Amino acid sequence: MQDDALIPVEAGEAELAQRRGVAHALQAMQAIVMRELLKFSQQTGRLVSALVRPLLWLAVFAAGFRNVFGVAIVEPYDTYIPYDVYIAPGLVGMVLLFNGMQSSLAMVYDREMGLMRLLLTAPLPRAWLLFCKLCATALLSVLQALAFVVVATLIGTDLPLLSLGGLHALLALVCGALMLGALGLLLSVHIKQLENFAGTMNFVIFPMYFMSTALYPLWKLRESGAEWVYQLARFNPFTHAIEWIRFALYGKDPGEAPWVVLGCLVVFFVLACWGYDPQRGFGGLTKRGGGPP
């Protein structure tokens, strides 16, 4: 009888411990996200630089090439559109891409200064801590992208934002931010020192951006005879993130783009978690001198 009486007590304690564990995990996410937001709020130049880059392309590049690059009436467009409207989703993707890569720099800095090692020794699953960091990065990316969209709309870029397509595009924006943030996490595993960051990023940001549909449609690449660039752009996950946003804005079926983006998100994040395992990536980096002594 005594043993039977203890069973409900033990079950209740287990449930209470589980609730505390969930509360602890959510508290950790809130702390990490708020830390990143606080840092961002103190870096006004970061927001300005994030907006100046795509706005310069929109105001100068699009205006200069408006009459050079004709955009035919192809999906997802039902009518002829000006060039600035076409590249707007690509410039949104530029904001996501650069912020995702900048998060990689922040991870390398935190690892060298010891903050990341301290964070990863918290009594929580390492994958959860990395996921919290990823959510914080994606939130900052989305906020910067929305700020760019507002400014682009104010200077005359006509986008169908106030519609169901706009909500779908917001979902695509969030998923694209998560995918590129996960890529930044993965790259931070292999960047051992801050001095190596710039060189590594040049081999990631520029190929991903220019070998995509951010600035020109795929059929333009094939029509010009650049078959190898066309094939690379087809398999570039950044292309699919942009196309998902672009098709969603106009209420059209994005095809396989969401599955490619979500699949790459999972792959990048799993590999990043594997890389930050103390017995594999992160521990190995410390032994080779990539982290603090």
Image: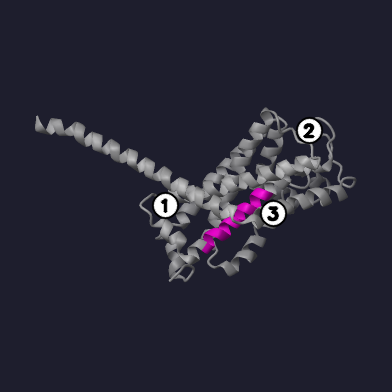
Q: What residue type is labelled 1?
A: Arg
Q: Residues within 10 Å of mark 2 (few under 14, many from 20)?
A: some
Is residue 106 highlighted in magenta?
A: yes
128 w.r.t. 200: above or below: above
Mark in the foreground, 1 or 2: 1
Residue projecting furthest to the right: 67
Q: Which mark is residue 250?
A: none
Q: Name the residue under label 3.
A: 48
Estimate the x, y position of residue 156 in percent, counting from the top left: 81, 40
Q: Name the residue under label 1.
A: 126
Mark 3 vs mark 1: which is more N-terminal? 3
Q: Residues within 10 Å of mark 1 (few under 14, many from 20)?
A: some
Q: Compute the Cα span from label 3 to label 2.
A: 31 Å
Mark 3 vs mark 2: which is more N-terminal? 3
In terms of depth relative to the viewer, which is nearer, 49 or 207? 49
83 w.r.t. 123: above or below: above
Asked where in the image residue 219 lies, by quadrant, the reply is top right
Estimate the x, y position of residue 124 in percent, counting from the top left: 38, 50
Disc 2 secondary structure class: loop
Is residue 104 highlighted in magenta?
A: yes
Q: Do the residues labelled 3 and 1 touch (CB within 8 Å)?
A: no
Disc 3 secondary structure class: helix
Q: Which amino acid does label 3 sit on?
A: Val
Mark 1 vs mark 2: which is more N-terminal? 2
In terms of depth relative to the viewer, which is nearer, 154 or 182? 154
State whether residue 253 appears in this view: no
Determine the main secondary structure of the stretch shown in magenta. helix
Look at 55% across and 45% down and name the residue there. Answer: 265
Q: Mark 2 points at which residue?
A: 77
Q: Are marks 3 and 2 in contact (CB under 8 Å)?
A: no
